[in-house]
Amino acid sequence: MKDVRLTIVGFGAIGRGFAKVLCEKHAFIAKNHGVNLRVSAICEVNGCLVNERGIDIGSALKPKNISLHKDFRDSKTIDVIKNVDADIVLELTPGNIKTGQPGIAHMLAALSSGKHVVTSNKAPLALNFKKLSDAAKDSGRQLKYEATVGGAMPLINLYKKTMQINEINSIYGILNGTCNYVLTKMEKEAVGMGIALAEAQELGYAETDPTYDINGTDTAAKIAILANSLMGADVSFKDISVEGIEDVTQSAIELARKHGHVIKLIGDAKELSVAPLLIPFNHSLNVAGTLNAVMFDTDIAKRITVVGHGAGAQETSSSLFSDVLDIANRINNGTFI
Amino acid sequence: MKDVRLTIVGFGAIGRGFAKVLCEKHAFIAKNHGVNLRVSAICEVNGCLVNERGIDIGSALKPKNISLHKDFRDSKTIDVIKNVDADIVLELTPGNIKTGQPGIAHMLAALSSGKHVVTSNKAPLALNFKKLSDAAKDSGRQLKYEATVGGAMPLINLYKKTMQINEINSIYGILNGTCNYVLTKMEKEAVGMGIALAEAQELGYAETDPTYDINGTDTAAKIAILANSLMGADVSFKDISVEGIEDVTQSAIELARKHGHVIKLIGDAKELSVAPLLIPFNHSLNVAGTLNAVMFDTDIAKRITVVGHGAGAQETSSSLFSDVLDIANRINNGTFI
């Protein structure tokens, strides 16, 4: 059985969620995919845990913050990415949508030192897709990012692995669970946006500062990634025309409902737009609560819709593992030099 | 660029649909997948067209029936499968749900003579899944069957290629477009089953003899394939508990509607059952017309639902190509000995 070594960069909710699933599923992965996934390093802003023979994940997850672990050292993340032996670097830091850093630097350092990259970090790809893809191409290494769009839902791999013959006319749908929760709540319970949003925050569905969700920026970042990766575009999220849900009123929702429609925040990778749109009650994109839903309109399969959880640390790890196991499988097959 | 050679067995609606897409997409496939797909042979019940240097697909599609082609010879299909040089045999004959023949014989002949098999033929797999999978394992060749379940929808490859880390609690949904069309029509237009079915036949959504659709056999065959391939079962479609939609009355549908539900024919790969069930209006499985919808309930990603066209020659070719291009890609990478 082949060892595949991972460096995990970012050990917040997503990083810990990934590590927890890795811990639980280590035997399942070995049995079903013939690979022994080992973690060589875990990096956080203030230092790293390194053990090239394999970190004990259980012990790494014990302290609430990895920096409290007895073996934690204040090495620099970028040095660990470059110098610690690993096949795949998981870039799981929170994105800074203005600069894309430190994600961009982490990804470039990983690729240039011969590691594959798997990431859940939208910002670098929403800002600098071409630069990062070119760096991957030049390095002969993989840059995979299923987890940046749609949480647990297979979207990028869905197309690349199961719908390869299709040319895509458009991809559109609901890509932000916070907005969908708020709009659903306003529709079903006739409450205003303030109350709906407060409840979303209370339940942990919305951030303390949900500005980027509500104003459409988060959806725009995901649309830029879908357009670049699956529709041959070369855009940043700044090129997307964006209208958020700030101005959607209770009375607009009520009026839509009377005419058999709901209002949903829809991102469109063909039109490069994000806006609140009317969706008929019985449409496949009319999904409730925090669910996401994305429709692929293609030439051969026609329309394929996927519905699933667009967020959540455990759910998102399904997408991270989809990328990790694809690379691991190809390492096993000797695909890479 | 690597040549990958195909033998097409069965040149009815599905076979011709596949060939048409191959013809239109030959350049797209070469450019995007680095493979030159060539057809070495096309077989029909009464003979075959063979050209190991590559059949001109345009000319093969011209006559309404391939047997009218000037180069058509009365060779036996089984001999062509065994003896004509090909990498992949596409088994696209209509299934005989009672015997699984001639599909079973075709698949075994292909595997034992070193060819991979891609099929849309449900019956052999719904009857003899283990025998055929074992034959594939023994031969070191691939047996792939995405097109047997859910038409254009990625289901088997969806799991195997994009949700690998998940353990599946259950898979259930709508897998027969004829039944869904009839039930939708009865619900929306308050007509009886006879009228709804007659219209489905007129529009080409139902067979002249729709018995196996209406009585649930077709759904049971698909459920057997999903249970065997994704849930570790070892069953034939005969082991599925089946109730069709014959006894669903207009008044039952009306009563369900009054209580916020629709009636749908649901197959369940965990329960190994097919039966008309109540589905809430706003449930992801409440899709209208000929659409199919399948929900995966898993441990990590939670619920992922796919909605799409469950039939149609062109649509189904999306799934056939998903399998063909996966094998072609692995031939290109030197995965097979």
Image (cartoon, coloured by chain):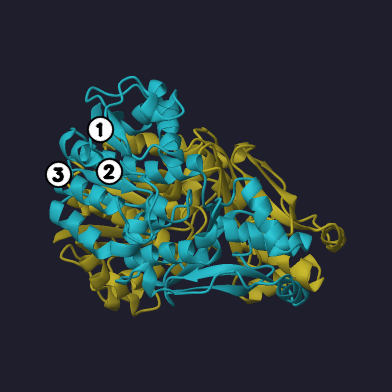
Chain colours: A cyan, B yellow
Q: How far across and how far down the image is residue B257, in percent?
A: 82, 61
Q: Is residue B288 left or right of residue B225?
A: right
Q: Nearer the viewer, residue B138 or A166?
A: A166
Which of the marked residues, 1 or 3, is nearer the chain's N terminus?
1
Q: Is residue A23 left or right of residue A102?
A: right
Which of the marked residues, 1 or 2, is nearer the chain's N terminus?
1
Q: Amino acid at mark 2?
A: Ile
Q: Chain of mark 2?
A: A
Q: How far across and how far down the image is residue A279, in percent?
A: 63, 72
Q: Chain of mark 1?
A: A
Q: Nearer the viewer, residue B309 or B113?
A: B309
Q: How far apart are labels 1 and 3 at the CA level? A: 16 Å
Q: How far across and how far down the image is residue B133, in percent?
A: 39, 37
Does residue B300 appear in the picture of this structure? yes
The residue at which mark 3 appears reads as: A113
Q: Amino acid at mark 1?
A: Val
The residue at which mark 1 appears reads as: A4
Q: Which residue appears at 74% of the width and 55% of the height?
A: B280
The residue at which mark 2 appears reads as: A327
Count of marks, rendered view: 3
How many other residues sit within 10 Å of disc 1, few (<14), some (14-19) or many (≥20)?
many
Judge whether A199 appears above or below B24 on screen: above
